Amino acid sequence: MKLVLLAEDEYGNAEILSLLLEAEGFRVACASNGRVALELLAGEKPAVILTDFMMPHVTGGELGQAVRANPLLEDIPIVVMSGTHEKVVRESFTDYDAFVEKPYAADSLLQLVAHFSVHGRAQQAAGGTGAAGPKLDASLQRFLRGLKV
C-alpha cells in the first residue's frame, strides 16, 4: 500500500480524509501542521503529499519549499488544498503539482491522489511548474479544472 502524507490542521477534515484515503487502499500518515509533516518525512517517503495551505507553525507553502529543497524528497507530488484563492498560494509557493480549492469533491480529490501515486511528477519533467504549468498533459489539466467546484 502506498503512503500518503496528509498535513491538515483541522482535525475533522483530517479524520474524514484519512478514512476516505484508507478506504481507497492508501496508508495515511497525518500531521497537524507542516512542522510535524517534516518530522514524518524523516521516516518513510510518501507517494504523495496532500497539504492544507494555511496551518500554524509551518504552512503548506513552507512545507512544499522544504520538500523541493531536499534532493531526497523533491520528486514527491504535492497537492495543496485551501479555502483561499490559488493566487494567494502562488505568492509564496509555486512548485506544487495540483491545487484543490476547498470545499472539494472527495471522489475527485481521491482520483487526483491516485493519479499522482501512480504517475508521480512525471508530467513535470519537461519543466512545468505547479498546477497551472503549461507542461501538464491535457487529460490531467481537464481533470484539475473539474476539481474546482
Image (cartoon, grey):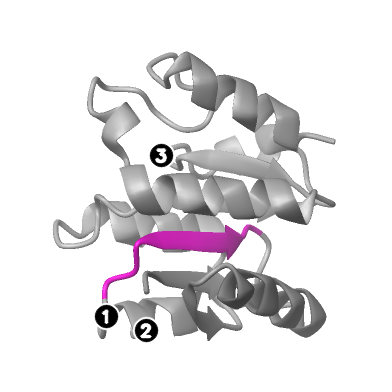
Which residue, given by chain and number where applicable, does mark 3 sit on?
A: 95
Q: Is residue 132 above or below residue 10?
A: above
Q: Residue at x 62, y 74 (%)?
A: 23
Which of the two marks, 2 or 1, is nearer to us in this view?
A: 1
Marks 1 and 2: in contact by CB < 8 Å? Answer: yes
Three-letter amino acid code at the position of disc 3: Asp
Q: Earlier in the sequence, mark 1 or mark 3?
A: 1
Which of the two marks, 2 or 3, is nearer to us in this view?
A: 2
* Circle 1 SS class: loop
Q: Residues within 10 Å of mark 3 (few under 14, many from 20)?
A: many
Q: Residue at x 24, y 20 (%)?
A: 126
* Circle 2 SS class: helix
Q: Residues within 10 Å of mark 1 (few under 14, many from 20)?
A: few
Which of the two marks, 1 or 3, is nearer to us in this view?
A: 1
Three-letter amino acid code at the position of disc 1: Glu
Which residue, given by chain and number where applicable, does mark 2 sit on?
A: 40
Q: Position of residue 122 (x, y in %)?
A: 27, 35
Q: Residue at x 26, y 80 (%)?
A: 44
Which residue, given by chain and number where applicable, does mark 1 sit on?
A: 44
Q: Position of residue 45 (x, y in %)?
A: 27, 72
Q: Is residue 119 above or below residue 48?
A: above
Tell me if residue 108 is in the magenta stretch. no
Which of the two residues, 32 or 112, is positioned nearer the viewer here?
Answer: 112
Q: Is residue 57 visible?
A: yes
Which of the two residues, 149 or 115, is positioned nearer the viewer here?
Answer: 115
Tell me if residue 52 is in the magenta stretch. yes
* Circle 3 SS class: loop
Where does the magenta region start and end? 45-53
